[in-house]
Image: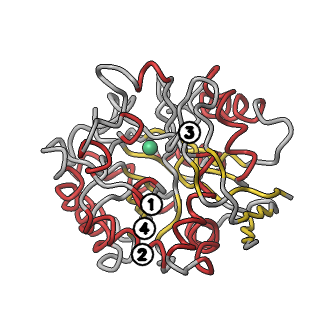
Amino acid sequence: MKTHKLIMPLDMHLHLRDGVMLENVAPLSAYSFSGGLVMPNLVPPVDTLDGLKAYKERIVATIPNDYFEPYMSLFYKNYSRKFLEDVKEHILAIKLYPAGVTTNSEGGVSSFDIEAIRETLEAMSELEIPLCVHGESDGFVMDREAEFMSVYELLAKNFPKLKIIMEHITTKEAVDMLDRYKNIYATITIHHLLLTLDDVVGGLMMPHHFCKPIAKRPEDKEALLKVALEAHPKVMFGSDSAPHPKDKKEASHCSAGIFTSPIALQLLCEVFDDHNKLENLQAFVSDNAQSIYGICPEFKEVTLIKSEFSVPSSYGDVVPLFSGKKIAWSILEVD
Ligand SMILES: [Zn+2]
């Protein structure tokens, strides 16, 4: 049977939450990934050095049996240069949320007046701290990401030395930005390579396919697939795996977020294999991130096999993408 090895897979956009949920989901990422960029949108957000260190300790405590590097990120606010100097060695990036666009982002940035954020972004450029951005406007839901491109342009032009990572891109407009600005990069999820809006609301409504940014049109998915499958050097895998308890998903006011971390590598193998591009998966899922962020994770080798895997109906109280379905690839072993 066909097998495929991945070395040091990295998940560059990961929600591990806190408390009981953290204990449930962190070991699942730690099993198959070498590391992940942990998002800071807790309640309250991770925006102090003490808070960050304590969160990292809580993460590490949940994974006593696996090597997994939780690369930490800080919730964007205007920070002083002195604070950024102190925090730099403890973080990989700072994550900017426009206020209120997704789960626990209420304390985010409410205006993109460049002068109001210049001091912090200039200090980040000089200290070489990348800026990760949840890029959505407050417009009509299908247009939010495309409308945000003007903000990315403003940031890229005003801070040419700042590494800007467009997180979980979903549109061809975002794909086009990659070759337009030297300092713009992107993460792509597995679910946006698989789903369009039709899979969310085209038939019966599918709460486990509902996330922000919402899955878009077929031509957007094709544009994402093109850069992912060729492992465009400015693109990396970030699952945006975002667990919510089942009763918050299968409910009126369904929370936004798709849980994929335990099946992400299997699904990536399936997609890349279906397009005869398995040879590019290593770059998409690790090598590109290593060179963009300048990181060198500890060795881990994951062997996948083209043999059906039945996705569990739930992991604890979290329902994964494609729960109860069969997917084409499984994890054979992890060394
Ligand atoms: Zn996210």
Q: Give how far across and how far down residue 88 sits, in percent.
A: 60, 50
Query: Is any part of residue 233 visible from this angle?
Result: no
Residue wearing tag 1: 188
Three-letter amino acid code of the residue under disc 4: Tyr
Mark 3 and mark 2: span between their CA atoms?
Answer: 30 Å
Q: Nearer the viewer, residue 284 or 123?
A: 284
Kindly report which numbered mark, 4 or 3, lies closer to the viewer in this rendering.
3
Question: In the picture provided, is 141 more to the left or to the right than 298?
Answer: left
Disc 4 is placed on an element classified as: strand
Residue wearing tag 2: 227
Q: Nearer the viewer, residue 159 or 134?
A: 134
Residue wearing tag 4: 185
Mark 2 and mark 4: span between their CA atoms?
Answer: 12 Å
Q: Are marks 4 and 3 in contact (CB under 8 Å)?
A: no
Q: Nearer the viewer, residue 297 or 257?
A: 257
* Total numbered labels: 4
Three-letter amino acid code of the residue under disc 3: Gly
